[in-house]
Image: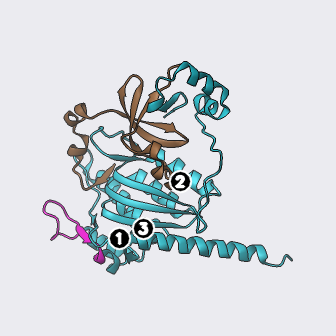
Amino acid sequence: MITLAHWDHHSETAPSPEQTDKHSSNPVLEDIKDLGTPKLSEPLPKNPRGNLHCLTIIGQVEGHMILPPHNKTTKYEHVIPQLISIEDNPDVDGLLVVLNTVGGDVEAGLAISEMIASMSKPTVSLVLGGGHSIGVPLAVSTDYSFIAPSASMTIHPVRMSGTVIGVSQTFEYFEKMQERIVNFVERNSKISAEHFKEIMLRKEQLSNDVGSVIIGKEAVEIGLIDELGGLREAIEKLYYYVEVEKKSLEEIKNQPKH
Amino acid sequence: MIYSIIPYDMIMKVEDSLNTPQTEIIEYLGYQVEVQLLDASTVQIQRIHSTDLKAFLNPRLQPGMKISKRLN
């Protein structure tokens, strides 16, 4: 990634000599020009209910391999540092994870899921459109999860294409990969590993694969997602968690010291 | 290892990639944005990568906005 230190808004491409002089005498513009760090004259007002951040996980989750550019991707190396800064920044009170993903890299997906699951700040997820394959552990990784009534989640086994060398070893490797996903989902949702696996290996629903398509309400009924809802419900839940968090922090502070 | 509903061959197809515009992630006004290079000195914002909700309401960060390199 490059830092845009010497770039400015399009309308300012050809400054007149007068403007150039004005710029060089203005310390705020100097900062923008030289360091890429704009200084605002006044800090933006803080939301009294808490400052929320939003992470959108869209397209393919990109991990160890750079995918061809026709894929819309969410990159592991962008998301992980963002999650760390959200956890570390005292100005951020909660995180909303919005999912519309077709799946992607197993290890990148699991890494992001584990990061979200281990965050101390309140997190809420909202599945819109689709939360397929590796989108499933991502959706259940938050403190509370929502799914839109029309959204769907495809649960299917981890599969492969191409030449397979050493069938039994490869099969075992895939089994282990799958086990990691199943375990994560079991740890972070109300569904049991057995039930999740049974859904994953169903034969009637997908034409050229085993697996299931779970739509909206069904995801809640099987215990994968907590509630059916949309943006309003997700934001309200997050503000509720932020409030609870603040209250418990105050209680800890007000406790008499021994 | 890919775990996706899109078939592996479709994800990895190369011919489609040739006509796809190249994008880059840069930091602008303190926020991470994905831009498409239009010419040597102009880029166009395609997507906001920052998670900060304030970035999405900033008119200078709207997708489609062009940013030019200042001529020094």
At label 2, the amino acid type is: Leu
On screen, B64 above or below A44? Answer: above
Q: Residue furthest bottom?
A: A221
Q: Secondary structure at mark 1?
A: strand
Chain B is which colour? brown
Whether residues under marks 2 and 1 lie with C-beta atoms below 8 angstroms apart, the answer is: no
Q: Which residue is mark 1?
A: A147
Please name the color used to draw chain A: cyan
* Residue at 29% over, 44% down: A71
Mark 3 and mark 2: span between their CA atoms?
16 Å
* Chain letter of the residue carrying label 1: A
Let me know if residue A180 appears in the view. no
Magenta segment includes B65: no
Residue A197 drawn at (x, y percent): 31, 70
- SS at mark 3 in the image: helix
Q: At which x and y percent is residue A69?
A: 30, 38
| Dot 2 alpha-carbon crowd within 10 angstroms: few under 14, some 14 to 19, many 20 or more | some
Q: What segment carries the magenta color? A: A202-218
Where is residue A157 shown, x and y percent of the image?
A: 27, 61
Label 2 belongs to which residue?
Answer: A83
Describe residue A65's horizontal placement relative to residue A46 as left or right: left
Residue B23 percent location from the top left of the image: 36, 35
Q: Are marks 3 and 2 on the same chain?
A: yes
The residue carrying mark 3 is A140
